[in-house]
Structure formats: structure tokens, C-alpha cells
Amino acid sequence: MIVIEVPDDVVYERMLARRLCSTCGRDYNLLSNPPAKKDACDCGGKLVQRADDQPGPIRDRIKDYRSVTQPVIDLFKKKEKVVVVDGTQPIDKVWDGIRQGLGLAKR
Ligand SMILES: [Zn+2]
């Protein structure tokens, strides 16, 4: 099992910043992966926010993760190999952490 661990408040901010193109379906994040032009997809389509990427639903999803998913992770940690990587690092560092945790060579 691979767990990319990110503090709840960072998850909240990231989910709140997610946008989806209503034309081509491309994903953006206004914080880490913004479109070239504000509020529009690079294809020209309108960017929308998923209904469950609103503050209330995000808090509910984080609560569900901590109450339903976290106990499963904790159980796995007792029985199986669980690689935990800090998901607040840059993407290439997260990849390196996963590879290192799995005993794979560096890229
Ligand atoms: Zn698009």
C-alpha cells in the first residue's frame, strides 16, 4: 500500500482550488497547475467546480477519510508493507519517495 500523506488543511485548500473544463474535461488546480488564462481552459472552455469540491462536502469527505479510510491504513501498517510519502513535496520528490519506499532504483 502506498499512502501519500497530506495534512487535512492542505487537502482542503487543494480541493477548493480544483477546476474542471466543461468542454474537454481537463483538470486544473488554481494553486499548483493553473490554466494559461484565468478562469478559462487552454481549449477556451469554461472552468467549473465539482459540486463536491465545495467547503461543506470537502469537510465531509476529509472526515470520512479519517474515520473510514485511516483505520484501514492503520490495520495494513500492522500486517503489510505500507509506504508513506509526504504529499506536500514537489511531484518528483513524491515519486522518489515512493520508489525508495518500494526499494526501486532512483529514476
Ligand atoms: Zn478544455
Image (cartoon, rainbow, N blue to C red):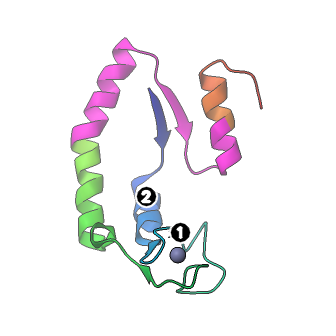
User: What's the amino acid at mark 1?
Assistant: Asn
Label 1 Cα crowd, 10 Å radius (few <14 / some 14-19 / many 20+): some
Find out whether residue 72 is within the magenta segment.
Answer: yes
Q: Is label 1 in a helix, a strand or a loop?
A: strand
Q: Nearer the viewer, residue 102 or 67?
A: 102
Q: Is label 2 in a helix, a strand or a loop?
A: helix
Callout in the foreground (2, 1): 1
Label 2 Cα crowd, 10 Å radius (few <14 / some 14-19 / many 20+): some
Q: Which residue is mark 1?
A: 29
Quadrant in which the C terminus appears: top right
Residue that sits furthest to the top in the current view: 79
Q: Which residues are magenta?
A: 68-95
User: What's the amino acid at mark 2?
Assistant: Val
Q: Nearer the viewer, residue 101 or 40?
A: 40
Residue at image position (44%, 72%) is 20
Tell me: residue 39, above or below residue 12.
below
Tell me: residue 91, above or below residue 27.
above
Residue at image position (68%, 20%) is 104
Q: Position of residue 40 (x, y in %)?
A: 54, 85
Q: Position of residue 75 (x, y in %)?
A: 29, 22
Residue at image position (28%, 46%) is 65
- Of callouts 2 and 1, which one flags the residue occurring earlier in the amino acid sequence? 2
Count of number-bearing discs: 2
Q: Is residue 79 left or right of residue 43?
A: left
Find out whether residue 8 is within the magenta segment.
Answer: no
Quadrant in which the N terminus appears: top left
Q: Which residue is mark 2?
A: 11
Mark 2 C-beta to ligand 1 under 8 Å: no
Q: Is residue 68 left or right of residue 55?
A: left
Residue at image position (60%, 31%) is 98
